[in-house]
Image: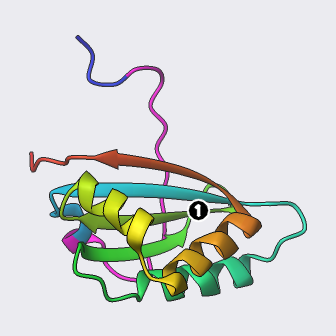
Amino acid sequence: MPAIKGVPEMIHALFKDYPSSAFSAPVVEFAFATLKEGKAMKELGRHLDQLTDQDTKTVVSATWGPVLENRRETLMIVGWQSIEAHQEAAQNGTPEIGNLIEQIMELSTLLVKHAVLQEY
């Protein structure tokens, strides 16, 4: 049985901070934000900076960076204690975090995936 469905696509991102702590978390979130037409990457970056700088108990580590292959796309990596911790944070997070996510969604289209990574 194949490990991946479809054709794999490789991307490269210039992360603000080194993502190794997030990759060692029990669950890793990969959030791609594609900038909407007429919106400014600088503004999206400002909101992503504020979001990844939040201090929460359930986030192991978070960072983001622009995707080199697509100037209108960013990748945010978030290490979570569990998927349930992410769901709990999404439902009961602070108003500040909720507002940041709303602003990010106004500026971009989001694609969010989770994975459990294992060291090879």
Amino acid carrying mark 1 in the image: Leu
Residue 61 position by quadrant: bottom left
Describe the element under mark 1 as helix, strand or loop.
loop
Residue 66: in magenta span: no
Q: Main secondary structure of the magenta part?
A: loop
Identity of the residue drawn at 50% across and 80% down: 97
So how many labels did they put on this image?
Answer: 1
Identity of the residue drawn at 47% across and 73% down: 64
Residue 120 position by quadrant: top left
Residue 81 position by quadrant: bottom left
In the image, the segment drawn in magenta is 5-21
Identity of the residue drawn at 65% across and 71% down: 102
**Which is more toward the observer, 78 or 14?**
78
x and y percentages locating residue 31 in the rendered image: 48, 57
Left or right: where 27 falls relative to 52: left
x and y percentages locating residue 41 in the rendered image: 73, 76
x and y percentages locating residue 54 in the rendered image: 39, 87
Outermost residue on the front side: it is 92
Label 1 neighbour load within 10 Å: few <14, some 14-19, many 20+:
few
> Does residue 58 appear anywhere in the picture?
yes
Residue 6: in magenta span: yes
Q: Is residue 118 above or below residue 78?
A: above
Outermost residue on the top side: it is 1
Outermost residue on the right side: it is 38
> Does residue 71 appear anywhere in the picture?
no
Kindly identify which residue carries mark 1.
68
In which quadrant of the rendered image does the N terminus lie?
top left
Identity of the residue drawn at 75% across and 68% down: 107
